[in-house]
């Protein structure tokens, strides 16, 4: 009876394959691929964050200059200065304010802010991956 059980279980392979040279090579290759992928991701995050941060003062200055030259500040101050007139002619005032908005500067500034926030969010989301890269390379 014991021989029957031995025959039955002799054909089964072990749960874990033996650790050989080939397995170690494959693991090392996968680890190197993950390291390269993480390095590329880190440099991408940093480059987008640096470019966005450098462009932030320029986009802010562009927004302020466009707002001053468009006259939107005049319309808003006139609306608050003569609030009774504003209430009676609110449609005309609102249309004048909307027409004088510096759309291009607002879009550029918004895209710049969105890139900074998106990059920081992705960096924090993947910080475990990125910090493991930084600690493994040193």
Image: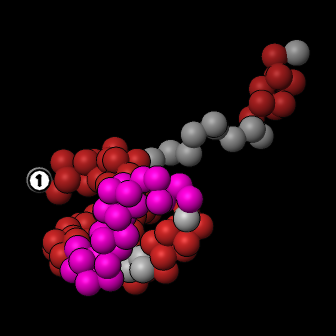
Residue 73 lies in the magenta-colored region? yes
Q: Is residue 20 above or below residue 44?
A: above
Asked if one can make out residue 12 in the rendered structure from this viewpoint, the answer is yes
In the image, residue 112 lies at what x, y percent? 33, 71
Q: Secondary structure at mark 1?
A: loop
Q: In what quadrant of the picture does the N terminus appear?
A: top right
- Where 79 sits versus 1, above or below? below
Q: Quadrant of residue 35?
A: bottom left
Q: Position of residue 21 (x, y in %)?
A: 39, 58
Determine if the magenta segment contains residue 86.
yes
The magenta segment is 62-88
Q: How is the image coloured?
A: secondary structure
Q: How many marks?
A: 1
Q: Nearer the viewer, residue 33 or 107?
A: 107
The x and y percentages for residue 130 are 29, 53
User: In this figure, which residue is indicated by the disc labeled 1?
Assistant: 138
Which residue is pictured at 42% across the width and 80% down the height? 100
């Amino acid at each position: 009876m014991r021989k029957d059980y031995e025959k039955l279980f002799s054909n089964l392979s072990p749960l874990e394959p033996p650790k050989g040279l080939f397995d170690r090579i494959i693991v090392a290759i996968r680890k190197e691929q993950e390291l390269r992928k993480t390095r590329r991701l880190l440099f991408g995050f940093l480059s987008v964050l640096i470019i966005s941060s450098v462009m932030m003062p320029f986009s802010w200055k562009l927004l302020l200059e466009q707002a001053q030259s468009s006259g939107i500040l005049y319309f808003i101050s006139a609306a608050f200065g003569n609030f009774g007139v504003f209430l009676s002619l609110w449609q005309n005032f609102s249309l004048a304010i909307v027409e004088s908005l510096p759309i291009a500067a607002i879009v550029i500034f918004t895209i710049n802010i969105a890139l900074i926030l998106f990059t920081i969010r992705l960096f924090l989301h993947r910080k475990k991956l990125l910090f493991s890269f930084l600690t493994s390379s040193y």
